[in-house]
Amino acid sequence: HTIKKQPYNRKLLQAVLQKNIELYDHEVITNEKGIRLVAFGRYAGIVGAYNGIRAYGLKSKSFEIPKAEGLKDQQELIRTLRTVSLPPIKILLTGKGRVGNGAKEILDGMQLKEVSVEDYLHMSFQEPVYCQIDVLDYNRRKDGQDLPMQDFFDHPEEYESDFMRFASVSDIYIAGHFYGDGAPFLFTRSDVKQKEFKIQVVADISCDIDGPVATTLRASTIADPIYGYDPEKEAETSYTQEGTIAVMAVDNLPAELPRDASEGFGDTFVDHVIPAFFNADNRGILDRARMTRNGKLTPNYAYLQDYVDGKE
């Protein structure tokens, strides 16, 4: 993808333009209201949550389960996780979109107890629990006003992170949120140095490198999915070392669940996209997703020109 000006894909977009390729990005196949019609997010959430629990077992040396890529489907992931006995830990999940709710399917499949924000922050439990939070739970207005969620999306610069209250009581953090430009970082490298920061495992499904989740230094791979973050050195290390945070930041998670992801993606593609090729694109679905044409960026993506030219 290049819609966020990802530096590691600049050469790919340059080549697409040079070779006069007409490029459509499935991330921007949307309806008239800008809602994505075709997405792998649910499957990223499912695999990311599984990988997060697996990373906790390896980090704590309490259990080992196979990689998701070796299992048949979501149901086998859940059956495998149900063989695990977790201690009374707290698992934090951000995001209530496709990714976050996909991760929730796994936590619910494990029959973990979901608790409210207040109980999560202030109560102790004799069993593992999780809490799914949204943007106004971990961000607050700088002026203290309590406004509707839309205000956050309209004026993200007016907000600051309130994530540390969760970091101080969480053992595993599963990042399934969407991060928009201008929004506060959830936590910084300085935050991770604080004694109050208790998170041992970060499963960063969103995988915004060197961004809102400070421990994500790079994307990891399916072959080698976990690395360590040393809070003091602000550098990568082995996740098994004492005092480090285990980071799972695989950026192509649905590829570990190819059967389910392909069927789900295919169903929505057939329902929403294929008709556009035969009805003169009367809903503008293809037009909104077309990034390049005749060797040039289309008007919707002209903002990428400086990125293509290497000026930013």
Image: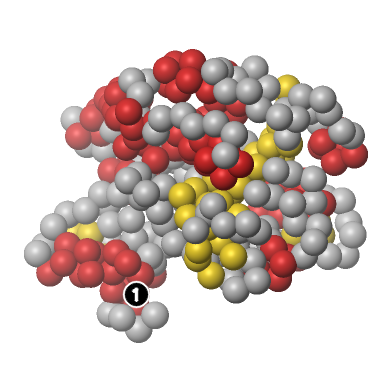
Residue 152 or residue 2, whichever sits in front: 2
Please name the colour scheme applied to the rendered image: secondary structure
Q: Position of residue 137 (x, y in %)?
A: 77, 46
**What residue is at 89 percent from the left and 34 percent from the top?**
123
Q: Position of residue 113 (x, y in %)?
A: 73, 22
Q: For the N terminus, which image quadrant?
A: bottom left
- Disc 1 on helix, strand or loop? helix
**Farthest residue in the left direction?**
19
Q: Residue 211 sits in which quadrant?
A: bottom right
Whether residue 236 appears in this view of the structure is yes
Above or below, 78 relative to 278: above
**What residue is at 35 percent from the left and 70 percent from the top?**
7
Above or below, 3 relative to 312: above
**Farthest residue in the bottom direction?**
311
What's the amino acid at mark 1? Answer: Tyr
Residue 1 or residue 217, whichever sits in front: 217
Whether residue 99 appears in this view of the structure is no
Lateral position of residue 78 relative to residue 127, left or right: left
Residue 117 or residue 289, whichever sits in front: 117
Lateral position of residue 132 relative to residue 275, left or right: right
Numbered label tally: 1
Residue 99 or residue 286, whichever sits in front: 99
Above or below, 95 relative to 267: below
**What residue is at 23 percent from the left and 59 percent from the top?**
292
Q: Residue 71 sits in which quadrant?
A: top left
Q: Position of residue 250 (x, y in %)?
A: 42, 48
Q: What residue is disc 1 on?
A: 307
Q: Position of residue 303 (x, y in %)?
A: 39, 70
Lateral position of residue 167 relative to residue 173, left or right: right
**What residue is at 38 percent from the left and 59 percent from the top?**
3
- Label 1 neighbourhood size at 10 Å, few (<14), some (14-19), many (20+)? some
Q: For the C terminus, which image quadrant?
A: bottom left
